[in-house]
Amino acid sequence: MIRAAELIQRKRDGAELRAEELAELVLAYARDEVPDYQMAAFLMAVYFRGLSSAETFALTDAMIRSGETIDLRAELGRKVVDKHSTGGVGDKTSLAVAPLVAACGVPVGKMSGRGLGHTGGTLDKLESIPGLRVELSHEEFVAQVKEVGCAIIGQTADLVPADKRLYGLRDVTATVDELSLIAASIMSKKLAAGADAIVLDVKVGDGAFMKSLDDARELAETMLELGKRAGREVVCVLTDMDQPLGHAVGNALEVREAVATLRGEGPGDFHELVLSSAAHLLALSDLDVDEAEGRRRAETAIGDGSALATYERWIRAQGGDPDEDALPAAATVRAVAAPRDGYVTAIGAVRVGVAALRLGAGRATKDDLLDHGVGVVCRAKRGDRVSTGELLAEVHAGSDEDAAAAGEAVTAAYTIGDEPPPPRPIVLDVLA
Ligand code: URA
């Protein structure tokens, strides 16, 4: 019988737990033998005390061992690539990058997560597409990567069930933004899903869990080490999350923006991040191309329509309807106007993320149902010049009351000044 209370107490008091103790706790939780309230207390103790690198490795390993693992190279007979983001606001990158890389001839097999804290999750975005299934069996996942070139699935009872349960619990207990928990959650999914080469998009700034470049580098280095120990090639790209990515924040709104980007009509910062992520993935693949050639091929796939065609094939393969008209829309749309003339110098990404969450795009408790049509569209971005009364953003809401509250929050998220802010590139650094 596991003595969860004793492990919670020792972690609370700053002790280092042994690998077998961590494994016992995590595996018992995944089997439903440790209740949520004890695991929540344990996570809070980890939040304050952190984990050593040995503990982080043990936690990741235990999470992987809570379910099955997939060896995609053995199943496909060739190299498969994967990407993951540490979480941001308006981060719909995987929805565009996965089909784009597949359209360039490189298989992508990916396990994603749901919304976490103020950040959105790829699975929630995908589930705004009518009919789409994210819970594929091991066999369905492998068959789809083989036949369609790409698949994105969720954690299941078979694949990293410990992350599925811990992820849901962290989301609603203020225990998301702890470096070791993020590293173990991401790397357990990446290592269990079996891709050989992985690009990790480590977000930095207000809307990210890592607010400074130094913290983001530390997270990147922890994940690089976990990847190296497992014999995988990993590249970490540190990217700006000081303002929402692209324009759209909210599930169906983000799907529309990802599709527009695959048509070559995406917002500048998002388009650039998609191309840069695709270029890194293609350079890691078995195509034997460098990053510059990878980027050129990704641009061609957007230009000739093959990226969009691959997206449509992928969505159909998972049971979804790729027609944009099938996506849900919010009951009401409210304009947010600029209160003065000037330049947008900042857009508080957390504020926008929380406004979208409160509209129903994210969860306050584990069992909350989402409203997939709601969210915020930030029409004006950092550096844009605006005049009084001009459109800054749109709030897509389920009711006029919700729209009014979110409108106020979004207005407060914008800072307008007299001078344009210094430019900040979307890609800040690359670590390998
Ligand atoms: N993405 C994940 O999968 N897990 C985290 O903890 C954060 C981002």
Image (cartoon, helix red, strand yellow):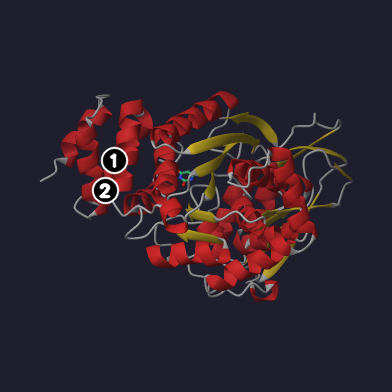
Instruction: Bin the neighbour count of mark 2 within 10 Å (Cα to Cα): few under 14, some 14-19, many 20 and up.
Output: few
SS label for mark 1: helix
Q: So how many labels did they put on this image?
A: 2
Question: On screen, 246 above or below 427?
Answer: below
Q: Position of residue 396 (x, y in %)?
A: 67, 63
Q: Quadrant of the C terminus?
A: top right
The foreground one among 280 and 245 is: 280
Q: Which residue is mark 2?
A: 37
Residue 180 appears in which quarter of the rendering? top left
Q: Position of residue 172 (x, y in %)?
A: 41, 49
Task: Answer yes or no: is residue 132 visible.
Answer: yes
Q: Which residue is mark 1?
A: 41
The foreground one among 141 and 242 is: 141
Question: On screen, 256 above or below 113?
Answer: below
**Cα–Cα span, label 2 and label 1:** 6 Å
At 48% from the left and 45% from the top, the residue drawn is 196
Give the residue type that dot 1 points to. Answer: Ala
Task: Answer yes or no: is residue 8 visible.
Answer: no
Instruction: Bin the neighbour count of mark 1 within 10 Å (Cα to Cα): few under 14, some 14-19, many 20 and up.
Output: some
In the picture, measured across the screen, residue 413 lies left or right of residue 173, that is: right
Residue lying furthest left in this view?
1
The foreground one among 6 and 53 is: 53
In the picture, measured across the screen, residue 60 lies left or right of residue 144, that is: left
